């Protein structure tokens, strides 16, 4: 699943570690999300969307 997480994080001026702290996950998880190696759980996707005040579907792009 592709996403715009890196762009959103950089727009806020946050490091991966800073975003990880805000989401209560590891920096490695943020890296895996940004590189598309890991798809977030639904609760994590909702936390990300809430943090950036964006709809989930504008952050995560589903591809069949």
Image: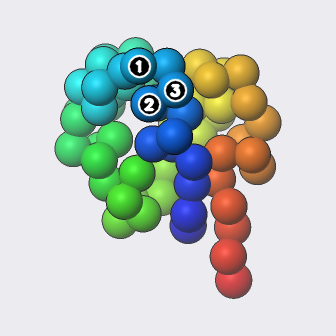
Residue 44 position, x and y percent, is 52, 37
Residue 35 position, x and y percent, is 36, 59
Label 1 belongs to which residue? 13
Circles 3 and 2 in contact, beta carbons < 8 Å: yes
Give the distance between the C-alpha atoms of the residues marked 1 and 2, in whole angstroms.
Answer: 5 Å
Circles 1 and 3 in contact, beta carbons < 8 Å: yes
Secondary element type, mark 2: helix
As drawn, which residue projects farthest toward the bottom?
64
Query: In the drawing, what numbered circle is on residue 10?
Result: 2
Please tell me in which quadrant of the rendered image residue 37 appears.
bottom left
- In the depicted structure, whether residue 50 falls above or below residue 3: above
Query: In the drawing, what numbered circle is on residue 11?
Result: 3
Give the distance between the C-alpha atoms of the residues marked 3 and 2, in whole angstroms.
Answer: 4 Å
Circles 1 and 2 in contact, beta carbons < 8 Å: yes
- Left or right, 47 with respect to 17, comes to right
The crowd level at tag 1 (other Cα within 10 Å; few <14, some 14-19, many 20+) is few
Secondary element type, mark 3: helix
The crowd level at tag 3 (other Cα within 10 Å; few <14, some 14-19, many 20+) is few
């Amino acid at each position: 699943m592709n996403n715009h997480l890196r762009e959103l994080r950089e727009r806020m001026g946050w490091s991966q570690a800073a975003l990880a702290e805000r989401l209560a996950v590891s920096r490695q998880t943020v890296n895996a999300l940004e590189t598309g190696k890991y798809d977030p759980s639904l609760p994590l996707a909702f936390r990300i969307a809430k943090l950036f005040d964006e709809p989930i579907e504008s952050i995560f792009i589903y591809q069949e």
